[in-house]
Each structure stands twice: as C-alpha cells, then as structure tokens.
Amino acid sequence: MDDFGPLTLDAGEVWVMGDNRLVGSSLDSRTYGPIRVQDVVGQAKMRLWPTPRALALTATK
C-alpha cells in the first residue's frame, strides 16, 4: 500500500478508508483524496478497531 502522511485536512474535510483486504478493490481517500463532510452519507454505528477500544457510537446531534 502507498504511504500517506503526514497529511493536513482543511476544515470541513474527512479522510475515509475502505476495506482494503484485496489490493486495488477499495476506492477511498487513498484514491480520491479528502472529501467534504457535507458529502458524507450515512453514519458510523460502531468502532471496531483497535479491538481494545471497540464500542457502539452514539449520535452527537
């Protein structure tokens, strides 16, 4: 995998990572770069990694 970083995001940007178990099968910020928060669709329900910090996430709105 390519090495990224350090990387500074502008306000209102996020860096998204997909499932990269198969090289070249994940189209995420490594391909497209940062995306605008306003373009995010959906919401995270759980954090699974790192395993010791896995937890269900709650809404902030």
Image (cartoon, helix red, strand yellow):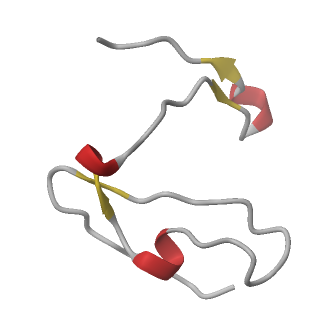
- Please tell me which residue lies in front, 28 or 7: 28
Q: How many marks?
A: 0
Q: Position of residue 10 (x, y in %)?
A: 17, 61
Q: Residue at x 57, y 60 (%)?
A: 17
Q: Is residue 1 left or right of residue 22?
A: left
Q: Is residue 58 left or right of residue 45?
A: left
Q: Is residue 44 left or right of residue 26?
A: left
Outermost residue, right direction? 22
- Residue 5 appears in the figure: no
Q: Position of residue 42 (x, y in %)?
A: 48, 34
Q: Residue at x 52, y 77 (%)?
A: 30
Q: Measured along the vertical axis of the image, is residue 7 above or below residue 50?
A: below
Look at the image and tell me in which quarter the C terminus lies.
top left
Residue 60 figure quarter: top left
Q: Residue at x 31, y 50 (%)?
A: 39
Q: Residue at x 73, y 60 (%)?
A: 19
- Residue 16 appears in the figure: yes
Look at the image and tell me in which quarter the N terminus lies.
bottom right
Q: Position of residue 7 (x, y in %)?
A: 34, 73
Q: Measured along the vertical axis of the image, is residue 52 above or below residue 10?
A: above
Outermost residue, left direction? 11
Q: Measured along the vertical axis of the image, is residue 29 above or below residue 50?
A: below
Q: Position of residue 21 (x, y in %)?
A: 84, 68
Q: Is residue 52 left or right of residue 32?
A: right
